[in-house]
Amino acid sequence: MAQNYYQKEIETMPVEDLKKLQSEKIVKQVKHVYENVAYYRNLMDEKGVKPEDIQSIDDLHKLPFISKADLRDAYPYGLLAKPLNECVRIHSTSGTTGRRVVAFYTQNDVDLWEDCCARAIVAAGCDEKDVCQVAYGYGLFTGGAGLHGGSHKVGSLTLPMSSGNTDRQIQFMMDLNATLICCTPSYAAYIGETLKEQGYKPEDIPLKAGIFGAEPWTEEMRRGIEETLGIKAYDIYGLTETSGPGVAFECCEQTGMHVNEDHFYPEIIDPDTGEVLPEGEKGELVFTALDKEAFPLLRYRTRDICVLSRKKCSCGRTLIKMAKPMGRTDDMLIIRGVNVFPSQIETVLLNEGYQPNYQIVVGRVNNTDTFDVNVEMNPEQFTDIVSDVLAMEKSLANAMKTMLGINPTVHLVAPKSIARSEGKAVRVIDTRKLV
Ligand code: DLL
């Protein structure tokens, strides 16, 4: 398939030139962060690194890492590198406990982020003649805003649907001839199943491509979605901490995602030692934002396990490729596209007067994640009056919804009925085989 590019000069830049560009950017960026972010300046001082020690991208390894724990400690403004009056937007996602991650954007940050998403849309074979249905959630989540902005940049007609209300999604898709859909892969599969149930065949559906990400998905899922919707399904990766979707995107080869490495420099490290691993080795993915202004994280540990490859790509892009993430080094779950940490459930239980004896059960039915939480009652809470138990379950589910942003089904169970483990407690039973 012939490839178009959104920013050809960058996307096909010789690797040596790209490295020069990255080097120029990192020297400036480290100065910006050192001067404006006391939290990171302290980390650099502790490590004995000064901005002058970073003369090129090859010096990056001298810098300290940033992790989700730092984001929690510095919440909400501690990593902000620009005055608040120069920021125009926030987005947010769950943190490991009650504290969420809040990312800030200047207008320039939004602009560059939307360019990254535009690159993904053009790589999926779309342009200003296309109709782009954005069915990622809008709001604090980055999915809706990111692809929406990218679609505007490309000049496609944008349908800002947000997620959910599948009948309405289908009505707009069919009536307005949507040619591109952007949503989580599980929602794409669900929309596909619904279309099939309503009697539509792939050839009746106007879509030609989909851009799917925000959660792990397999090659089998890709094939299934491509068949039911009659489209090409492209992967897209990103995280709130680095701006959102568009850190990496798939091209027509569909064998991994090109990293927008003129903006986000990727490293793979050994998660235990922090040592940088050579290209092709599996480890934890680390990103450095080379030109973000408001929330510029340097060497951010994503906890995603991945492999990078600079093998020549038939699409003509020279940007390095990352494989589909192969798991995580922490216990974060992604349920219906939302990041969930067991520690958040624990925080809610303690706040609500329960003991942290619980089990999270995640599955998938009809391409939709199921999310159940079994919680032990304390002996003093225990009752066999059904209406009381139902009311307690409802109140606990509401508290969890407030913390997580998604609704679990809570089951209160008798004291001491959740099996105790001799070693690490088994907190999560996940029957979806996603990686
Ligand atoms: O999920 C941003 C996004 C929105 C990406 C829309 C793609 C499309 P967070 O909610 O902060 O941001 O979650 C980030 O999701 O560290 C990965 O573990 C996971 N993830 C994101 N994209 C993919 C993908 C958005 N394509 C976390 N495949 C990341 C597998 C993904 N996992």
Image (cartoon, rainbow, N blue to C red):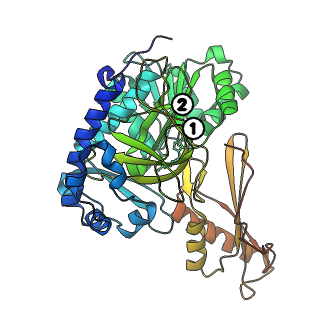
Disc 1 marks a residue whose amino acid type is Lys
Q: Which residue is identified by label 1?
A: 324
* Residue 404 image position (x, y, % from top left): 54, 60
Q: Residues within 10 Å of mark 2 (few under 14, many from 20)?
A: many
Ligand 1 contact, mark 1 (Cβ < 8 Å): yes
- What whole-number distance in Å separates the C-alpha atoms at marks 1 and 2? 6 Å
Disc 2 marks a residue whose amino acid type is Gly
Q: Which residue is identified by label 2?
A: 256
Tell me which corner region of the image, top left, top right, bottom left or bottom right, holds residue 355.
bottom right
Q: Is residue 392 left or right of residue 414?
A: left
Tell me which corner region of the image, top left, top right, bottom left or bottom right, holds residue 171.
top right
* Residue 207 image position (x, y, % from top left): 55, 20
Q: Closer to the camera, 75 or 388?
A: 75
Q: Closer to the camera, 237 or 346?
A: 237
Say which element carries label 2: loop
* Residue 168 image position (x, y, % from top left): 55, 33
Q: Are marks 1 and 2 in contact (CB under 8 Å)?
A: yes
Say which element carries label 1: loop
Q: Name above or below for residue 139 compared with residue 311.
A: below
Q: Name above or below for residue 93 compared with residue 417.
A: above
* Residue 309 image position (x, y, % from top left): 50, 32
Tell me which corner region of the image, top left, top right, bottom left or bottom right, holds residue 410.
bottom right
Q: Residues within 10 Å of mark 1 (few under 14, many from 20)?
A: many
